[in-house]
Image: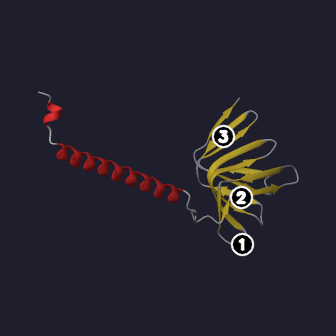
Amino acid sequence: MNLLLSLNKKYVLIISIIVFFFFVIFFIFKFYSSFDKKILDGAIQISNVDVTEPRFSINSPTQKIYVTASEGNFVDNNQILLQKNVMFKSRNFSIETDNVLFDRKNQTAHSNDKSIFKSKNTIISSDGFNIYDNGDKIKFNGYSVIVLK
């Protein structure tokens, strides 16, 4: 005897409808949860940064040093705290670090974070630096390693 013919058709139909509703509810839930996630991902993020991607320059009589960063916050009217991927670049050298206090009025900058100075034949890794005299002088702070090529 055929097993399929011996099943009660009413019970098979009820079980099929229940399974179908579970699948429908599952897919609706998945759709709405992904829809809410997309709305949250597209929402406007409010940050605590005053300036995004700030750009400055230190003008000295001998060279021009360009300063870029990912974030900047005003400390006062003249001082700006530059954070994340801070780069000082001129024709002769570049300095990379993460946090720098830049003074726009005096054209100075100093950092107490790990810094890497690169020029044509020199690499200096230090625990910070101080740029003064309108960018003509750079003093390296803390433990420093100099590599000459």
The residue located at (69%, 56%) in the rendering is 53
Quadrant in the picture for residue 7: top left
Does residue 117 appear to the left or right of 107 in the view shown? left
- Tell me the mark number nearer the camera, choosing from 2 and 3: 2
Q: Which mark is residue 124?
A: 3
User: How far across and how far down the image is residue 146, in percent?
Assistant: 65, 37
- Give the residue type that dot 2 points to: Pro
Work out how far the residue at label 2 is from the one at label 1, CA to CA, in angstroms.
Answer: 15 Å
Query: Which residue: 69% across, 49% down?
Result: 87
Tell me the distance, in whole angstroms, between the alpha carbons under discs 2 and 3: 25 Å
User: Is the C terminus in the top left, top right, bottom left or bottom right quadrant?
Assistant: top right
Question: Of marks 2 and 1, which one's residue comes earlier in the chain?
Answer: 2
Earlier in the chain: of badge 3 and badge 1, it is 1
Q: Secondary structure at mark 1?
A: loop
Whole-percent x and y of residue 82? 65, 58
On the image, the x and y values in percent for residue 88 come to: 73, 49
Looking at the image, which is closer to me, 86 or 47?
47
Q: Amino acid at mark 1?
A: Asn
Residues under labels 3 and 1: Cα distance? 32 Å
> What's the mark number on residue 54?
2
SS for callout 3: strand
Judging from the image, the colouring scheme is secondary structure
